[in-house]
Amino acid sequence: MRRSTLLRIAVAAVLCAATATPAGIRDRGFEAGFYGGQEIGDADTHVNSSPAYGVRFAYAVNRKVMAELNVDVFNTTFDYVGRAGDPSFPVNQVPFSENVATGFVSYTLGMTANFLADRDVKTTPYLSVGVGVMTEDRAGTQFCVDLFPQDTTKCSDVDPDGGLVDPNSNKDPNGVDWITEIRRRDTGTALTIAVGGRTFLTNWFGIRYEGRYYHHDTFSNNQDAFQVSVGATFTFGGKK
């Protein structure tokens, strides 16, 4: 009697395993999630590394192919570099570097190819490519450069408009140079490619982790960035 009961339990378990739906992605189902990570900015445009975060929404054409919308935010700083002083006398110009806040927001739509999606496994790797727009918002700044450190005229002696703080002093206002950079915003084309994976803890909830490459052309500069992130993902709907 006991052996018969155990046999029935074993057969039922095998049948359940044979008809089980793979965890997570389903045909004509949906996926939504959020993430956070670290992004390395473009070295050529002096964009510094900083945390990034975003959200994702996807529709599964089937378990192997998905259309995905990605919204990403990257708030960081860049080093505003140049040379101060009279450009007609390059030998007297002084190089400067000022740290300025900047932010990037991208909206990309792409296709994601899931691997091992037709198997009853908890981890599914994927490859994703996308195209969209990137907006860069550079904050304004104003600072002073001392052109002749050995001179007695200092930045504190000269107003941003070039006049002397003390009009009765004998300081030379040409000994310093005030630099003004206004706030600017620009939008350009963005391309992305990412590789990563999902590890499902239940049939509808998992951890998603990836490495993503960004290329965009805001302010007419070809910029590249690389991001590593991890986050939560949720799946719902679709064909069981």
Image (cartoon, rainbow, N blue to C red):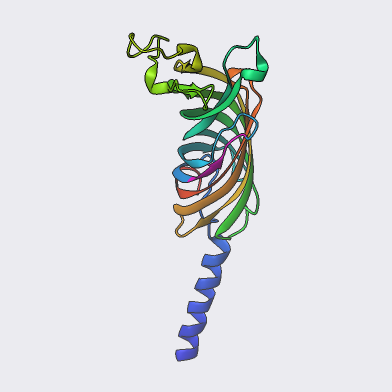
Whether residue 234 sits left or right of residue 197 in the image: it is left
Whether residue 53 sits left or right of residue 45 in the image: it is left
Give the percent coordinates (x, y) of residue 103.
Answer: 47, 29
Is residue 48 covered in magenta?
Answer: no
Name the image quarter holding the N terminus.
Answer: bottom left
In the rendered image, which quarter is residue 193 located in?
Answer: top right
Report the magenta stretch's main SS.
Answer: strand
Relative vertical location of residue 103 with respect to residue 180 in this rendering, above or below: below
Give the percent coordinates (x, y) of residue 67.
Answer: 57, 34
Q: Which residue is painted at 50% across and 72% down in the image?
A: 12
Give the percent coordinates (x, y) of residue 83.
Answer: 59, 21
Whether residue 64 sits left or right of residue 59 in the image: it is right
Q: Pick whichever, 55 or 74, lies toward us.
A: 74
Is residue 39 covered in magenta?
Answer: yes
Q: How many marks?
A: 0
Q: Which residue is painted at 34% across and 8% down in the image?
A: 167
Q: Is residue 1 visible?
A: no
Residue range of the region highlighted in magenta in the rendering: 37-42
Q: Pick whichever, 66 or 193, lies toward us.
A: 193
Q: Which residue is painted at 59% across and 54% down in the image?
A: 124
Q: Extreme front residue here?
A: 170
Q: Is residue 67 visible?
A: yes
In the rendered image, which quarter is residue 42 located in?
Answer: top right
Q: Pick whichever, 2 or 122, lies toward us.
A: 122
Q: Pick whichever, 145 or 121, lies toward us.
A: 145
Give the percent coordinates (x, y) of residue 238.
Answer: 49, 43
Relative vertical location of residue 233 with respect to residue 188 in this rendering, above or below: below
